[in-house]
Image (cartoon, helix red, strand yellow):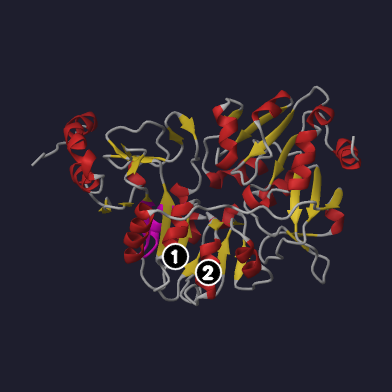
Amino acid sequence: MSALADRLRQLIRPGDTLWWGQTTAEPLTLTRAVTAHRHALAQGARLRVFVGIAASDTLAPEQADAIDFFGYAAGGAHRRLADAGVLDILPCHYSHLPGLIRAGVLPVDVVLLQVSPPDEQGRYSLGLAQEYLPAALEKARVVIAEVNPGIPWTHGGVHLRTGDFALCIDAEHPPLEQSRSAPGPAEQAIARHIAALVEDGATLQLGVGNLPEAVLAALHGHRDLGLHSGAVGDGIARLAEAGVLTNAKKSVDAGVGVGGILMGSECLRRWAHRNQQLALRGTEYTHDPEVLAASHKLAAINAAIEVDLTGQINAEVAAGCYVGAVGGAVDFLRGAARSKGGLPIVALPATAKGASRIVARLSGPVSTPRSDAGLIVTEHGVADLRGQPLSRRVRRLIDIAAPEHREDLERQAYETLRRCGAAFNQK
């Protein structure tokens, strides 16, 4: 057993529940040590690990021989866990996680962290993520950290000192990066539609994935945009460096962009380092309904797997596989709906592998109810569902479906509305 594994065995007890930062905030040296030596750490009592979105291949189905995996998402490589049936899904709003932790409903015994080198005052920054980690730190018996020189020192939220760690080691790996593929024609068209809706001075919230980055690229002709988002990607850094993202018009945290986690590459980390115009905050703040409602022209832009003809949204299951999460979309859509001049937007390509993503009936759960649907955007246009009865919703959604699927959706529309007790004029 390695020296690190031996130290971990002294700190991690059989049956413990472990938490760590998701995506780019994963402390790779520590998580790889835990999974490699899981049998010695569990000692027959099994460990539990909370799972978020993955940016690495650290966790694998075969590790379920000693680890029970549970979590709110199956993003990235964690889809392998869901597909193998070893990930116990927690179907809750992302904003509920800190409260569930503090109430003891979600147990936390050990927190593994990736932190920046300390500043002149000896304070370590969580660097890339605050999110639900502050709540987990409050409840943890043991906090173990790895110091990574590639992690930026960021403002906002919790900062720690050497005495807060039961163990602190040097990182053996560079920071993880959230890879993105180049946007295709459909994503670019969607981005143009959304950019046309967003006004100068708006405050941006963006979900995760390729589509938000395409939207950000389409906003370079705007002025004085602001940031209040859970996820922050490379496109935000590029907007800021281009002088488009100034946060000058924000009604809350004027002059400062707010985020929960940095999910990008070196350009994002470099921009974020000691940047006083950026503050990373915990989930209770980034998703706070009052803060969102008070935000100036909040444009909430989130993705989905499919939308039915009445506006119900599935963001969790595709083709019978759990690939997404309930996440924070409902919080942001409701906040944008209450924000003066806000835009509650859900965007998705009209098709996936030839199948329509505007559907008569969802193939998965209702992640966002139709009562919270606002503007649905595909490459074929924008369906504004706000204040619209079911019959008009159906018509507007069919109009932004892929043309080759519209006739079939027309045929299914009557049955869809009949189930809802509504009328539908097919003319």
Q: Is residue 89 visible?
A: no
Residue drawn where x is 75% and y is 35% of the image: 35
Question: What element does badge 1 sit on?
Answer: helix
Residue 345, image x and y in percent?
37, 54
Residue ID for mark 2:
238
Residue 60, image x and y in percent?
66, 32
Residue ID for mark 1:
217
Residue 343 in magenta stretch: yes
Residue 141, image x and y in percent?
80, 42
Report how many numbered discs are placed on residues in the image. Answer: 2
**Which label was assigned to residue 57?**
none
Residue 53 in magenta stretch: no
For the record, the magenta segment spans 332-346
Residue drawn where x is 42% and y is 57% of the image: 300
Lateral position of residue 9 relative to residue 315, left or right = right
Amino acid type, residue under disc 2 in the picture: Arg
Q: Earlier in the sequence, mark 1 or mark 2?
A: 1
Residue nearest the observer in this picture, 84 or 279: 84
Q: Residues within 10 Å of mark 1 (few under 14, many from 20)?
A: some
Residue drawn where x is 55% and y is 37% of the image: 74
Q: Is residue 420 visible?
A: yes
Compared to 70, does 402 lie above or below? below
